[in-house]
Image (cartoon, rainbow, N blue to C red):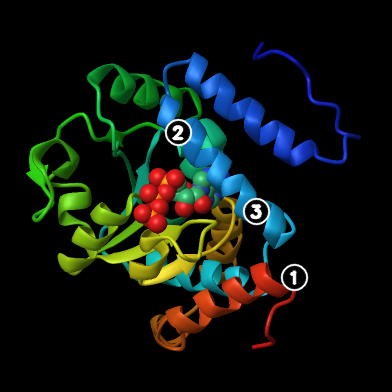
Amino acid sequence: MSDIAVPESHPRYESLLTRHRIEAGVEKGITSQQGLIAQGRGEAFDYLLGERTIESADVAARVAAAHLLLAEHPVLSVNGNVAALCPGELVELADVVGADLEVNLFNRTDERMRAIVDHLREHGATDVRGLTADGRIPGIDHERAKVDAEGIGAADVVLVPLEDGDRAEALGAMGTVELVVDLNPLSRSAQVATVPIVDNVIRAVPNVTRHARDLTDASEADLRAIVEAFDAEATLDAAERAIRDGTEREA
Ligand code: ATP
Ligand code: MG
C-alpha cells in the first residue's frame, strides 16, 4: 500500500502525501497507531487554517530560528510522526543550527526507538541521541520522563514538534526554552511553549531552516532583539482567529 504514487495534480496533493508518509511510518515501525490519530487531529486544524503557513506562524518560525542560533546546546526532539513526515528536513535543520537530534517518544519501546534512529541515519543523520535515556524530566511519570541527560536533559533550547502537553509543561518548568510546532493553538503544548509555531511540521521545519540560513550572519544583538520582540499570546490569538474567521489580524 505504501508504494501508491500520489498524483501531483490532485487538489489535495499535500494532504494525501502526508497521510501516505504517516501510513508508511506505521508500516515501518516508526509511527505508533496513536500517531495516526494525532495526525487526524492535526489535519482538521490544517484544513481550517487553509493548509498554508499563516503570517503569525512565519514570524514564530523566524523567532524559533533566532533562539536556535543563540542557543549553547540546542536539541531537536524527534517522535514517530515527525520522523515519518520530515526526517531529511530535521537533519538539515540540525546541521544548519548545530543542534543535536534526540528521539523522544511518548509511547517508548526499544524497537521503535531503534527504527527511528535508523530511519534518521538513512536520511543523513550521523549522531542521534535518545537510546541512552539516563536523564529524567522532573514531575512526570517514569517511562514518559526519560531523556538523554546530555541531550534534552542539558539543552537550553529544544524544538519539540507535536509534543504531549504534560511533557511540554514539565520541560518548561525546567527552564528550557521550548519551541513547539502544533497545528492546534488550543493544545496545551502550544499554550505552554516559549514559541508556539501553529503550522504543519511538514511546512514549519523547512521554514525554520530557511529563516536560520537567512539569519546566520545576524549579530547576537539582532537575534536577541528578534527573540525579545516576540509575543506568544498574540501569536496564539492570531492563529485562533485565522481558524475562526479564515482571516488573520495584521501585525
Ligand atoms: P492537548 O495538548 O490539548 O492535551 P493532545 O496534544 O493530547 O491535546 P494529541 O492528539 O495527542 O492531542 O496530539 C496531537 C497534536 O499534534 C494535536 O494538537 C495536533 O494538532 C498536532 N499535530 C498532528 N499532526 C501534526 C502535524 N503534521 N503538524 C503539526 N501539528 C500536528
Ligand atoms: Mg498537545
State the quadrant of the N terminus: top right
**Helix, strand or loop status at disc 1:** loop
Question: Of marks 2 and 1, which one's residue comes earlier in the chain?
Answer: 2
Among the 4 quarters of the image, the one containing residue 56: bottom right
Number of dots carrying numbers: 3
Q: Residues within 10 Å of mark 3 (few under 14, many from 20)?
A: many
State the residue position of label 1. 246
Badge 2 vs badge 1, beta-carbon distance below 8 Å: no
Using the image as rendered, state which of residue 227 and residue 140 is in the foreground.
140
Whether label 3 lies within 8 Å of ligand 1 gets the answer yes
State the quadrant of the C terminus: bottom right
Alpha carbons under labels 3 and 1: distance apart: 12 Å
Residue in the image at 91% along x and 35% along y: 9
Q: Is residue 63 above or below residue 36?
A: below
Disc sitting over residue 35 in the figure: 2
State the residue position of label 3. 46
Disc sitting over residue 229 in the figure: none
Q: Is residue 14 left or right of residue 233?
A: right
**Helix, strand or loop status at disc 2:** helix
